[in-house]
Amino acid sequence: MYNITRIILPLLRVNQLKKQTLKNVTTSFCALLMLCVCPQAMSNSSKNPGWQPARPIMVTVPSNPGGGWDQLGRFMQRAIGQEKLAPVSIEVVNRGGAGGIIALSELVSRYNGDPYKLMVTGFGMTGATIMHNSEFDLADTTPIARLTSEYQAIGVPFNSPYNNLEQLMAAFKKSPESIVWGGGSAGGADHLFVNLLAEKMGVDPSKINYVAFTGGGEATAALMGGQVTIGVSGYSEWGGLVEAKRVKLLGVSSQERVVNPNIATFHEIGIDVVYANWRALVAAPNISEEQKHYLIELITHARNSQTWRQILKRNNWQDSFLVGDEFARFIADDKQQTQRIVERSGLGEGGKGYAAVGPYFFPSIAGVGLLLSGIWIAISAYRRGELMLPRSEWQASFLPLLKITAILVCYLIGLRWIGFIFVTPLLIPALAMQLGSSKHAQNFAVGVVLTLVITLVFENFLNVLVP
């Protein structure tokens, strides 16, 4: 019995050791398998702990397609998508007008506290908010990340008589009114660059002939069509036109020939101008710290990716990455510097001579118009003696007016909380019904057409925000 026990016990111990070893090997194999099969999922979860988006993130480009802002937004969309950095898609929409103030006003007022709304911004928007005396500026947003800086380049049509930078600048200094500049919106990076250039050359800024466009694509089309003499834009925006020999680039705003050895700098011909246009992403105000952290981490990982490094190299963009509180301080400093450029260039002090544009501009116009109309109706009724009628007759006469007034009050509230495009088509048939019309479908169609016409006129020609 003793001998059997001595034989069996070691065998049991060996068997238990084998089971434990097998268990350890199996556990290690499963862990290794998870690392091999799901590295991206584990990577993403470690990158962005906490709040996660549950629906697509919208990036607003505050200009029409074709410019530097548009490029930044769409290239960032590509980097996040190709690197699979977000659990949701990134969508890009263009919202041009008023140097980006329309998009800025919507981000601050309409999308307050919404973590799914980002906006491309940059030096040009700072200048536009100052010149237009905007109700909002970049300090009202949530800074996410400054991403790039880019030098300005000036170009002329390929068949232009100007063949070098010295020749072109000599013509500008001799007769500034004869040179028509084409670039981005008033107060934007292109506009301020031309004014800074004139200041350094001793040219009266009031003699600058500058045509502002809402997007880089429109500016280059005007250059090709002969509407302007010189086009000014970020260096990367000229690529295809230069390669196709439709544009000659004559000058760049860098200190040395860092972007292209064949393009002269203003500095080397004796004009002391070194100028870089920064571009960035901001979010809506009043998002939570957790949401802000997620967005900063998302953009940081996109910026560190191989895809983004290739984008920077291909577009000759300078990496000027800055996030969070440091970026917020940069925005404040940049506003002060831009204010000085605007004042020295004679473009107005903080918006002198420019229309103020804000999210309440259109409702204010509508409200004042309705108030004046109501006062006029009351005075007319008083003169006709209708206010002195018996109670029954007074109610019969003024009940429709009270209903119309209630409809108009609801319309003004709807402008603020729903939007002009949605409430105006309903206003027309509602008013027509109170006036006795029974053609509801026709009245609704009239409301839709009127809404579209007003939107086009105000936002594309007057640069006034329609809520």
Image (spheres, rainbow, N blue to C red):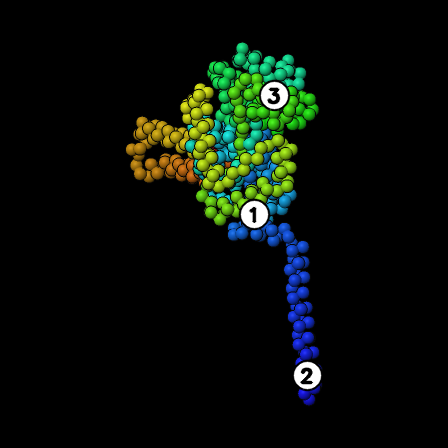
Residue beneath disc 2: 6
Point out the residue furthest to the top here: 174
* Element class at badge 2: helix
Q: Is residue 17 visible?
A: yes
Q: Amino acid at mark 3?
A: Ala
- The N terminus is located in which quarter? bottom right
Asked if residue 332 is positioned above or below residue 54 in the image, the reply reads above
Task: Report the Cα–Cα distance between label 1 and label 3.
Answer: 47 Å
Q: Earlier in the sequence, mark 1 or mark 3?
A: 1
How far apart, in angstroms, are the residues tagged by discs 2 and 3? 94 Å
Which amino acid type is shown beneath numbered disc 1? Arg
Q: Residue at x 52, y 43 (%)?
A: 296
Marks 1 and 2: which is nearer the front? 2
Q: Which mark is residue 55?
A: 1
Residue at image location 65% in from the left, 66% down from the top: 24
Q: Residues within 10 Å of mark 3 (few under 14, many from 20)?
A: many
State the residue in front, 239 or 261: 261
- Residue type beneath disc 2: Arg
* Residue nearest the viewer, comparing 74 with 275: 275
The circle on residue 303 is none
Q: Nearer the viewer, mark 2 or mark 3?
A: 2
What x and y, as percent, mark residue 310? 64, 37
Q: Which residue is mark 3?
A: 264
Residue at x 65% of width, y 70% of height = 20
At which x and y percent is residue 187?
49, 25
What residue lies at 36% left-to-right and 36% top-to-bottom? Answer: 398
How far is mark 1 from mark 2, CA to CA? 68 Å
Residue 428 visible somewhere in the drawing? no
